[in-house]
Amino acid sequence: MKRSVIFITIGVLVLALFAPVVNKEILEFLQTAYPGFEPGEYGQMGDWFGGSTAPFLNFFSTILLLFTFIEASKQSEEAQKQGAESTKQSQAATGQLKLALEQIELQKSEIKAQSLENDKNRFESQFFQMVSMHQDITKEASHTNGFGTTTTGRKAFQTYYDLLKH
């Protein structure tokens, strides 16, 4: 269809470009074929030629305009289809991004929970190390009184307390 529009357009342009040459040849032919043909009659001949060819040229112009309209309609429909497809792809991409964002938020909350659990485990570990150290210190504490009696462990702390109390 595009080829036919191009050929018709080229044909109309060729006719328009060569019309003056063809018209001159026709007039020369008329002057030689009809020796009594007067130049004043050229106007009448031109009116007749223009009047008879104008409807055909108008018809071809209308056909070209119709082809142009049909092509524009097809391109418009194609653009609408591409726009709809692009919209679908955008919506699909948006859905995928939302899903990815939800997964990231879930991972973020899991990492936060794991971090809290690690902090708790670290605190408990340090706490139990300190309790163990306290027990070691308590076991190693000793006090020897003036009579040579030695007390160790928790009893040594009781002795310290009694000495400080008095």
Image: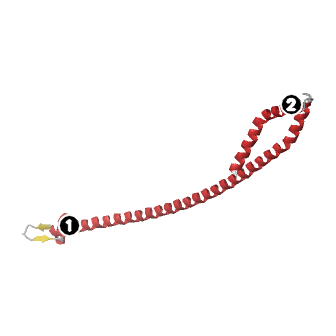
Which amino acid type corresponds to the residue marked 2 in the rendered image?
A: Thr
Q: Position of residue 70 (x, y in %)?
A: 74, 52
- Write the residue at 74% across / 43% down: 11
The quarter of the displayed image where residue 93 is located: bottom right
Q: Which residue is mark 1?
A: 161
Q: Position of residue 75 (x, y in %)?
A: 68, 52
Outermost left residue: 148
- Mark 2 neighbour density, 10 Å: few (under 14) some (14–19) many (20 or more): few
Question: Is residue 136 placed above or below 68 in the rendered structure?
Answer: below
User: Is any part of residue 82 visible from this angle?
Assistant: yes
Question: Is residue 77 placed above or below 146 in the rendered structure?
Answer: above
Which amino acid type corresponds to the residue marked 1 in the rendered image?
A: Tyr
The one nearer the camera, 30 or 146, is 30
How far apart in space, not on screen, are marks 2 and 1 (Cα)?
Answer: 152 Å
Q: Which residue is mark 2?
A: 32
- Write the residue at 88% across / 39% down: 51
Question: Is residue 138 placed above or below 65 in the rendered structure?
Answer: below
- Write the residue at 50% across / 60% down: 101
Name the quadrant of the C terminus.
bottom left
- Write the residue at 52% across / 59% down: 97
Front: mark 2 or 1: 2
| Residue 32 as seen in the image, left or right of residue 77 | right
SS category of the residue bearing label 1: helix
For residue 108, the mark is none
The quarter of the displayed image where residue 35 is located: top right
User: Is any part of residue 162 visible from this angle?
Assistant: no
Question: How many numbered discs?
Answer: 2
Q: Are marks 2 and 1 in contact (CB under 8 Å)?
A: no
Scheme of image coloration: secondary structure
